Amino acid sequence: MRGTARNHGLLQKGYIYQQRCGLAKKIRVKRVRDHKLNSVVRGQRELKKAWILFSIIGSSSESCVPLKCLNLHRTQLDIHPADHHPPKLSEYMTSYPDVFVESSFLDSKGRPRPGFGLTPQALKLYHKQAEILEKNQLELRDRLCRLLMLTRTKDRILPLETIDQLQWDLGLPYDYLNCFVPNHPDRFSLVRLPDGRDGLKLLFWDDKLAVSELMKNASLQQDKEDIKNDGSLAFPVSGFGMKKCMEWLEEWQKLPYTSPYTNASNSDRHTNEKRVVGILHELLHLTLHKQTEVENLSNLCKPFMLHQNLTKVFERHLGIFYLSYNYYEKPTVVLREGYNGRELKQKHPLVRIRQKLANLLKERLDNDENLYNSEEFGYDSDGFPIDIDKLF
């Protein structure tokens, strides 16, 4: 993350940096802000915070949780406005009256204590999410399998805290260790790592899953002429500042493509960079929203054998990745090909549920982000506001 901090100010100003590569001379590429993708990332951050609380309350037996218990999860929420004066959690939740409802209960001494539940609409939405998670359980299982298959460790193990950071991105249930992993004893096993942490181990390698998204979609995304006999395969490229480095890019695209699921320890430094880009490309494809915080990827450098500075890799390949920065938020990387403007091209059923949750949050978002006009909203057959797709 040092590289991220060092480059932050330069990137914010649209700094023109020099790209060095053995395939070409110095290349100057200008990073240009993509306001549409920036707005998508901002909306996702706010939605994720509310989803965590929504999931904790929805999964409780009484659909109501004491405020004291909710405060234990505050570090996950990263709640703070632009002035860096965090509001109380109760103030944050009451700002979403269409999702959270204040409640109270008596403690062991008969004294009233504050708590929060879900509104009838939000509770109905939580049950719909549970149905979709059950219906898509095998697909989500394969998604987690592919994440573990990307590791270069012999036993295909990742620390649970690393998976926790990707939980929202992968679409895993909030309490996935108790309600998801035990359902697949032939695929996953909980283990204790040498450093004392808990980890998740892959028990079965499925060759059918070991095909990258780029390889599967090559016929749809590219002309057949782009797939060479020497094994080269080109990544879809779009975005800003690419005209000045097209010659270098064309040469780089001709390098052999190695599947991220194969061992490429003998690759040279040029093909190794393409391998790294391939792993990052595949990992972002595993996410529902084709984006994740850079910090989440940095934690995967060792198990995925990614030795390069990831920020520099993203900067060199601005046509494949987009880095979204905000002074008060962690940087996020977005897979450009996953979006058409603000709209996510392929929407998982869970994404549509999250959109409905975002619709219930619309009053707060209208006031704080001005991301959309409430007059544009109608209501679907379940009574949920609609027409927020442009944010995703």
Image (spheres, rainbow, N blue to C red):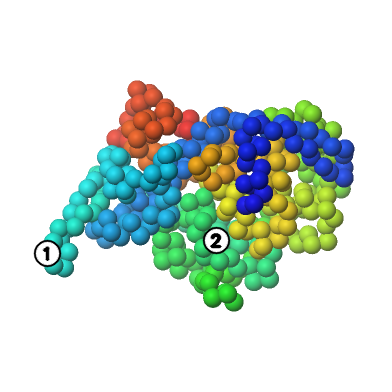
Image vertical order of residue 92 relative to residue 106, above or below: above
Q: Which residue is mark 2?
A: 162
Mark-to-mark CA distance, 1 and 2: 41 Å
> Can residue 328 be seen?
yes
Q: Residues within 10 Å of mark 2 (few under 14, many from 20)?
A: some
Residue at 71 percent across and 61 percent down: it is 305
Depth order, front residue of 49/124: 49
Where is residue 283? Give x, y as percent.
Answer: 62, 51
> Going from the N terminus, do you reach mark 1 or mark 2 first?
1
- Residue 217 showing in the rendered view: no
In this rendering, position of residue 27 left or right of residue 276: right
Disc 2 residue type (three-letter): Thr
Residue drawn at (41%, 66%) of the image: 178
Give amino acid for label 1.
Answer: Gly
Residue at 75% from the left image edge and 52% from the top image edge: 275
**Disc nearest the viewer among 1 and 2:** 1
Q: Is residue 188 left or right of residue 177?
A: right
Of helix, strand and loop, which one carries label 2? helix
Total marks in image: 2
Residue lying farthest to the left in this orientation: 110
Q: Are marks 1 and 2 in contact (CB under 8 Å)?
A: no
Q: Position of residue 173 (x, y in %)?
A: 43, 56
Badge 1 marks a residue whose secondary structure is loop
Residue 110: give its label. Answer: 1
- Front-most of 1 and 314? 1
Query: Badge 1: few (under 14), some or many (20 or more) residues near its Cα, within 10 Å?
Result: few
* Mark number, residue 353: none
Q: Which residue lies at the image location 41% right of the left edge and 61% below the top edge?
A: 175
Q: How far across and down, in percent of the image, does residue 359 sit?
A: 37, 35
Residue 20 position, x and y percent, is 82, 42
